[in-house]
Amino acid sequence: MTIERRLKPQINVDLTPLIDVVFQLVIFFMISSTFKTAPGIELILPDSGTATSITITELTVVAVSEDEVYVNKTRTTAVGAEAVVRAELEGRSASDVQAVLEAGADAPYQLVVTLLDSLKKNGVDSVGLSTRPAGEDSP
């Protein structure tokens, strides 16, 4: 005669909902995260009481030092900036191009003037200087 024992209940954990939640979190963080634009250089911009925001620029010049200048994403020097600007504007009407010049608050004035001259020599008349609103904390 055999005695039947009560069977212990089998517990199965379904991981499908957990995987769904993890995928939802991954998608949420991918969508909500922000990325730095352009060359990734952090500048402390000078303050300005009349700073306004612009949305569309076709040419961005970032001045870090005499030996490190970025035209859009192309690295060059202050002396070579004129040739890089000419190459960036190739095939376009330079008078219609809007440019933004970003230089740190401690950038030499001569560097800013040299870059403005290189833009002007290539026919770019509309140049904005990037600043930050007065009283805003530095990054």
Image (cartoon, grey):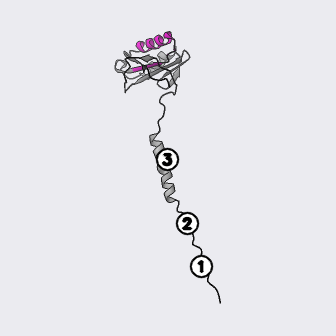
Which one is earlier in the sequence, the residue at label 3 or at label 1? Answer: 1
The circle on residue 12 is 2
Q: Magenta region: which residues?
A: 99-121
**Amino acid on which the number 3 mark rests in the picture:** Val
Q: CA distance from mark 2 to mark 1?
A: 18 Å
Q: Which residue bears the numbered disc 1?
A: 6
**Amino acid on which the number 1 mark rests in the picture:** Arg
The structure residue drawn at horizontal position 51% and vertical position 56%, both measured from the top left corner, is: 18
Q: Is residue 108 magenta?
A: yes
The structure residue drawn at horizontal position 61% and vertical position 83%, both measured from the top left corner, is: 4
Q: Please tell me whether mark 3 sits on a helix, a strand or a loop.
A: helix
Label 2: how many Cα within 10 Å (few below 14, some 14–19, many 20+): few
Q: CA distance from mark 3 to mark 2?
A: 26 Å
Total labels: the figure holds: 3
**Amino acid on which the number 2 mark rests in the picture:** Asn
Q: Residue furthest left?
A: 96
Q: x and y percent of residue 40 in the render?
A: 51, 28
Q: Which residue bears the numbered disc 3?
A: 26
